[in-house]
Image (spheres, grey):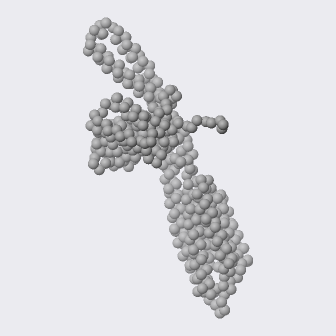
Amino acid sequence: MIRPTLAAGSTAAGSTRRGADTAGTPIGESANRQNLTLLTQLRWVAAIGQVMTIFLVTSLLGIALPLVPLAVVIALLLGLNLATLWRLGRPRPVTNRELFYQLFLDVGLLTAQLYLSGGAQNPFIMLYLLQIILSAVLLEAWSAWALAGIASACFMVLIGVSMPLELPHGSLHQLDSLKLLGGLVCFVLTAGLLVFFIEKINTNLRLRDQRLADLKRQAVEEEHIVRMGLLASGAAHELGTPLATVSVILGDWRHMPELAANPAMMQDMDDMQTQLDRCKAIVSGILMSSGEARGERVVATTVVQFLREVVEEWQAVRSPSHVQFDNDFVPDEPILSDPALKQVIASLFDNALEASPGWIGIASARKDGALVVTVTDRGPGFDPAILADFGTPYRSSKGRPGGGLGLYLVVNVVRKLGGRVSAHNLKEGGASVSLSLPLDRLSAPEPATDGR
């Protein structure tokens, strides 16, 4: 069932405050997934660097290494990376504990490689610092300290336990030079990887913070909508009694002989009754949109019929000069009609009519499982500042208090339905506003079955 009501705003705001994006994915989990992707990239670089290092040490320096065990370790590293890529394709959230296990395995594989290539005497032992720094950035405090302790313990074990390197005859005096060279290579490699990947991680963190700020702003806006909805609903209730009183008085006046004999007065009363009926319809629409008596107005229909009714009802009330309506939604789709959604679409028509009284264009289409309604006009277009903050309340080119609330409500109601609203100015003049709504949020739910 369609639920674009102001009453639904409190639920949406509540889920927003829990730190979930529009797809329901926690913000922290999204950052963890991106960081796990960075770890896989780091392993590809590490595997390539290890192969190159083994080749240079054995071919140029003539140092014998246990190639088969080292190849097994590299194969395990690549296997871990392939398993991680498969895991990233699963929808299960990436947690801090999983990142800890990933880094723990990296430390273990690094320890195995160092054990096979000289232990603590290998200058590449400083790569432990790379793992510790990454854990300090990526993990929670307890897990970062735990990984630092594990890496330190592995370092101490390698001081006493390792496979010694078999240096070529006569190269013992070159050992210090080789250590310095290896230390330099290790330093440059670690520095480059740290700058690159820490920058990537900081980018992920900045995106996460920006998304959190956007969610907080949405929560404030939705709370503002709820307050306006409560105010409108209360005002509608209060207006019901005086409107009914005026309607009764008008009915009594119609039966008064001295007024019934005056055609001009009767015409004025007819006009008053028409405007009074319109006020009643507006009040009823507010109450319907706030969730009251909803079951009486939500009806099964189709997209084509729904749009046709919206346009016809709006034309009957507004009487625009010329409306070009291209209803190109094919194939048709059954949905549930809701008064609040009608008001949202009619609000777009109203804004276009105010900007361009002589002509507005309305087009509908089906695109990627969504209903797309585009409203164009031949007015002056949007100010660039308004386009930059499209849908922000009280930002309008109409130059009157309260301007901009129409588009603000449209954007927020559509967002609750999982859709989006976009706007841009046309090169030939005028503006275009597009509303996209996922059809699965508008369709009637499937009937329950008993399994027979």
Q: In the image, is residue 451 above or below residue 57?
A: above
Left or right: where does residue 72 sit relative to residue 224? right
Q: Residue furthest top?
A: 257
Relative to the observer, which residue lies in front, 281 or 190? 281
Q: Residue at horizontal 35%, vertical 29%?
A: 317
Q: Is residue 287 visible?
A: yes
Q: Residue furthest bottom?
A: 170
**Percent x, y for residue 438?**
48, 43
Residue 235 figure quarter: top left
**Percent x, y for residue 290?**
49, 31
Residue 313 figure quarter: top left
Q: In the image, is residue 158 above or below residue 202?
A: below
Residue 40 figure quarter: bottom right
Relative to the observer, which residue lies in front, 441 or 288? 441
Left or right: where does residue 183 sit relative to residue 385? right
Q: Residue furthest right?
A: 161
Q: Is residue 180 visible?
A: no
Q: Residue at horizontal 34%, vertical 45%?
A: 432
**Percent x, y for residue 291?**
51, 30
Left or right: where does residue 2 sit relative to residue 159? left
Left or right: where does residue 82 sit relative to residue 262? right
Q: Residue at horizontal 59%, vertical 77%?
A: 51
Q: In the image, is residue 145 above or below residue 331?
A: below
**Percent x, y for residue 41?**
56, 66
Tally the marks: 0
Q: Residue furthest front?
A: 452
Q: Quadrant of the C terminus?
A: top right
Q: Residue at horizontal 34%, vertical 11%?
A: 254
